[in-house]
């Protein structure tokens, strides 16, 4: 793993360091998100991005045909607004349907660009911290996952350090390391989980591309059937809009939900269609 990181991000260091004028690399990813997790891509100062993300029910498994392969069901949906306070500092707000008993979820994030890839820096480096909370009514069942005693019990945090490199006009790769913390969990579960993420993007032409996003959970809950979220996407660019069609085993759309709470298994047909639509504006 160490050798892979070095070869990926430092192969051009000595060559690029010979130039004094920085030539910044743009469009490593099309959006501030890869598929559902964050990317190193940033909005410019005073740029605004509107995001709609949606996931249907299971494509396969028992009863899938009667539910039209999951299209009759809704796993999660999120609407979000993101804004560039500067070229290096972004903020965002969103609202999700939620997953399981964690319903009506509001979220927000702050994101800071530490490095941007250019002819002197072989990679882009970004930090993001996000917060989510459920404002749905707490359960009166003390053994329920949403038996919140106070407001702090409702909070979920995720922090990530992401490094990416645009290898050429057709291929970009991102590695991330992060931690997710839930203030309230069931007795047998752990509050904090670490994860390592990989996002790869391949572009066939200026309008069409594919993405793969995988997050490996380092310390899964021993008493549950936690699975690593894996998503595959087809990206279609139409000028101001970006459409992405996705297949994923994760039900949640926001990282504060799908990182700690993905229990579905690809091998059992527990995967679903989804899509996201993004639109950028200058304000």
Image (tube, helix red, strand yellow):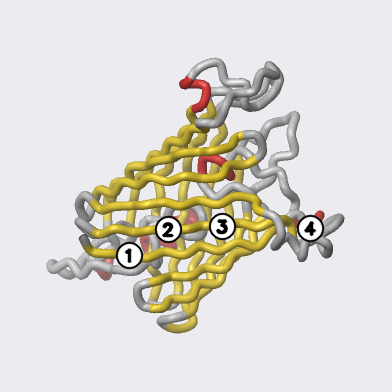
What is the number of the mark on residue 20? none
Work out whether mark 3 precedes mark 1 in sequence or the reverse, and give the earlier one: 3
Left/right of residue 136 with respect to residue 176 in the rendered view: right
Instruction: Please tell me whether mark 4 or mark 3 is closer to you in this view.
Output: 3
When asked about the image quadrant of residue 70, the answer is: bottom right
User: Which residue sits furthest left?
Assistant: 20
> Where does residue 241 sit, x and y in percent of width and height?
40, 71
Q: Which residue is mark 2?
A: 51
| Residue 225, quarter of picture | top right
Which labelled disc corresponds to residue 269?
4
Residue at image coords 74%, 57%? 58
Which one is earlier in the sequence, the residue at label 4 or at label 2? 2
Q: Identify the residue position indicated by label 3 in the image.
A: 54
Residue most extreme to the right: 62
Q: Residue at x 68, y 16 (%)?
A: 142
Relative to 171, does residue 200 appear above or below in the rendering?
Answer: above
């Amino acid at each position: 793993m160490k050798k892979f990181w070095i070869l990926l991000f430092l192969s051009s260091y000595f060559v690029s360091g010979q130039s004094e004028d920085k030539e910044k690399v743009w469009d490593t990813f099309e959006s501030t998100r890869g598929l559902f997790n964050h990317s190193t891509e940033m909005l410019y100062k005073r740029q605004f991005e509107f995001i709609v993300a949606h996931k249907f029910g299971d494509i396969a498994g028992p009863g899938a045909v009667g539910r039209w392969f999951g299209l009759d069901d809704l796993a999660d949906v999120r609407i979000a607004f993101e804004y560039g306070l500067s070229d290096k500092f972004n903020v965002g707000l969103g609202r999700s349907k939620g997953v399981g008993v964690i319903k009506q979820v509001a979220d927000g994030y702050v994101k800071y660009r530490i490095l941007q890839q250019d002819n002197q820096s072989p990679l882009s480096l970004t930090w993001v911290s996000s917060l989510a909370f459920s404002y749905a009514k707490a359960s009166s069942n003390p053994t329920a996952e949403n038996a919140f005693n106070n407001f702090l019990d409702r909070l979920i945090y995720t922090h990530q350090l992401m490094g990416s490199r645009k290898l050429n006009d057709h291929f970009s790769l991102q590695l991330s390391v992060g931690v997710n913390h839930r203030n309230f969990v069931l007795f047998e579960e752990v509050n904090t989980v670490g994860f390592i993420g990989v996002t790869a993007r391949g572009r066939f032409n200026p309008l069409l591309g594919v993405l793969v996003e995988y997050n490996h959970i380092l310390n899964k809950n021993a008493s549950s059937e936690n699975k690593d979220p894996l998503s595959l996407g087809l990206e279609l660019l139409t000028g101001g809009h970006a459409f992405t069609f996705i297949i994923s085993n994760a039900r949640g759309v926001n990282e504060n939900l799908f990182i700690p709470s993905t229990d579905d298994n690809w091998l059992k047909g527990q995967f679903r269609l989804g899509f996201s639509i993004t639109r950028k504006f200058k304000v």
